[in-house]
Image (cartoon, helix red, strand yellow):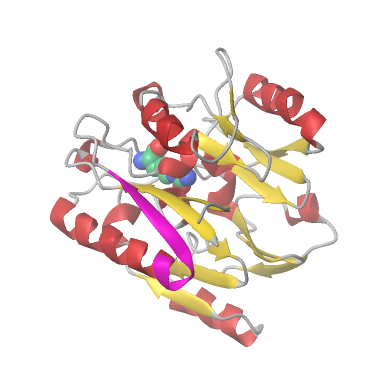
């Protein structure tokens, strides 16, 4: 059984942080209903979904992925790179405390969960504007005794590592070659996003199931042609806040 921790959309979503996406008006009511559909999609893929209440003073708090890294053995609370997002950690920590022993990164470390791609026992971490060398170093030190390697990965032109690459199956990745070097992932079968859909690399994998935004039909077609089953969800208003599908949940095994 999978558990997914989510947080409902803040009424302040329009005041979100933005880095590589131009600001445009966000229809918060529509974002709320899209997020509702996202949670139903997670249930459809076998998750028990926890919905934390909306945080009116935390515009980006729907993007729970950035405040923790949940592994089988422990969870690590991050110190988000955007100062405006640091208050989001505490509420998710209360929820996670029921499922895993908690570790935490400390200043001057910064690190966003969106930069962390776990492939087997290696955590690849994007060297982004949000995740600094101290953050990567602290993560490495915290997880070494649990048998994880932590490896920094250069990225350019996007917010997080998982904007550029996510996992499709044990041996397969979906990747945007303009934002991350595919040579970083030697040994994996790599499918590239369709060039007309630069933001399409963010796919949420739950077991053998995949979920991606409805707005990337060409990339989805590539995945179907490669033999994958891919569910879709319309997250257009969350995409205006520079979010996609992995960022809205923390999915992990366990807890009935
Ligand atoms: C931010 O800039 O922090 C938010 N507006 C978007 C965060 C998206 N997080 C993610 O993809 N992991």
Residue at left 78%, top 49%?
184
Determine whether 139 is above or below 213 in the image. above
Asked whether, in this view, residue 168 is left or right of residue 84, the answer is right
Residue 85, position as x, y percentages in the image: 37, 28
Q: Quadrant of ligand 1?
A: top left
Secondary structure that dominates the magenta span: strand
Q: Which corner quadrant of the image does residue 177 belong to?
A: bottom right
Q: Is residue 11 magenta?
A: no
Residue at left 40%, top 24%?
86
**Magenta-tinted stretch:** 43-52
Residue at left 53%, top 83%?
221
Residue with the most extreme right position: 187
Which is nearer the eye, 112 or 3?
A: 3
Residue with the most extreme front position: 256
Q: Is residue 35 visible?
A: yes
Residue 178, position as x, y percentages in the image: 61, 55
Residue 158, position as x, y percentages in the image: 51, 45
Residue at left 52%, top 61%?
204
Asked whether, in this view, residue 28 is left or right of residue 239, the answer is left
Residue with the most extreme top position: 108
Q: Is residue 50 magenta?
A: yes
User: Where does the N terminus fall, quadrant-wise?
Assistant: bottom right
Which is nearer the eye, 218 or 102?
A: 102
């Amino acid at each position: 059984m999978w558990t997914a921790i989510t947080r409902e959309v803040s009424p302040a979503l329009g005041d979100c942080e933005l880095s590589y996406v131009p600001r445009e008006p966000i229809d918060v009511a529509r974002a709320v209903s899209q997020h509702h559909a996202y949670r139903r999609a997670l249930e459809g893929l076998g998750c028990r979904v926890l919905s934390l209440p909306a945080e009116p003073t935390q515009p980006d708090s729907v993007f729970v992925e950035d405040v923790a890294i949940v592994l089988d053995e422990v969870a690590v609370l991050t110190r988000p790179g955007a100062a405006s997002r640091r208050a989001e950690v505490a509420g998710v920590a209360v929820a996670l405390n029921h499922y895993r022993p908690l570790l935490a990164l400390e200043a001057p470390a910064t690190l966003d969960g969106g930069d962390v791609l776990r492939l087997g026992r290696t955590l690849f971490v994007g060297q982004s504007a949000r995740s600094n060398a101290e953050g990567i170093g602290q993560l490495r030190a915290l997880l070494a005794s649990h048998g994880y390697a932590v490896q920094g990965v250069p990225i350019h032109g996007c917010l997080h590592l998982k904007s550029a690459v996510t996992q499709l199956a044990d041996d397969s990745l979906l990747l945007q070659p303009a934002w991350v070097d595919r040579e970083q992932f030697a040994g994996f079968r790599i499918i590239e996003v369709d060039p007309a859909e630069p933001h399409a690399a963010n796919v949420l994998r739950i077991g053998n199931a995949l979920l991606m935004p409805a707005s990337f039909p060409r990339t989805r077609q590539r995945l179907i042609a490669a033999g994958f089953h891919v569910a879709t969800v319309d997250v257009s208003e969350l995409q205006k806040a520079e979010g996609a599908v992995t960022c809205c949940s923390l999915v992990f095994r366990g807890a009935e």
